Amino acid sequence: MQLTKNDRKTLMLLLENGRITDTEIASKLKITKQAVGKIRRKLEKEGIIKGYKVNIDYERLGIKSFAIATAVLSREGMQKGFLEAEENLTRNPHVINIFRVPSGDITHIIIYGFEDLDELTNYFHRMPDDSVDIKKIHVCSHIGLVKNDPTELIKEILNRKDGKKYKAQFLEIERFRKRIEG
């Protein structure tokens, strides 16, 4: 989907503050409140905005231990099928993120959260999900969580599409294609 300049600016403002009103956005962009509403609905309909989430401080809620596990789909997981096995993992309350790895000796990277090291240890000793076989676990504490926010990456991508750097790269690709095509 091609984003307009106002689409990108609206997204930037929403990234900075998900609770910003359409009136506030309209004032900053110098467009009407109705135009902002139309942009927001378009971004939601196209699936660019999938929802509005709260940024949680894990430590203050008592989540102080994390495990980053590399895993391979188990025999039971293979019988269920990738999608069903992954759906089972997503329902696990300790699973924060799951990444499917495209190739190699592992199939998934899974990030888990726990109140403490005892809970983490007990969980992996009883492993309630037979969909995956854990190959390796990396354990860290809440103190080690340095960044848990994709906002800057998204801003970079939005700016790149509007900036000279992106256009220069695109032009270079086009020149290369023309040389090859003759």
Image (cartoon, grey):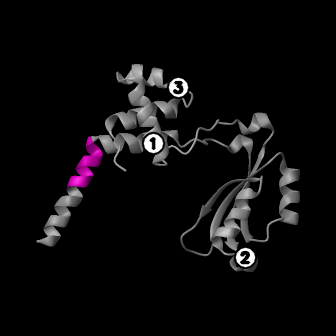
Residue beneath label 2, please? 74
How far from the left and from the top, in percent, is residue 87? 69, 63
Residue type at the position of mark 1: Leu
Range of the magenta residues? 164-171
Q: Residues within 10 Å of mark 1 (few under 14, many from 20)?
A: some
Can you say whether 79 is above or below 179 in the image?
A: below
Q: Residues within 10 Å of mark 2 (few under 14, many from 20)?
A: some
How far from the left and from the top, in percent, is residue 156? 41, 42
Can you say whether 53 is above or below 180 in the image?
A: above
Q: Secondary structure at mark 1?
A: helix
Residue type at the position of mark 2: Ser
Residue 43, numbered label = 1
Residue type at the position of mark 3: Ile
Distance between mark 3 and mark 2 Cα atoms = 45 Å
Residue 126, numbered label = none
Image quadrant where residue 108 sits: bottom right
Q: Residues within 10 Å of mark 3 (few under 14, many from 20)?
A: few
Name the residue at 54% across, 29% down.
Answer: 17
Tags 2 and 1 touching, CB below 8 Å: no
Name the residue at 73% across, 76% down.
Answer: 74
Residue 20, numbered label = 3
How far from the left and from the top, in percent, is residue 4? 33, 39
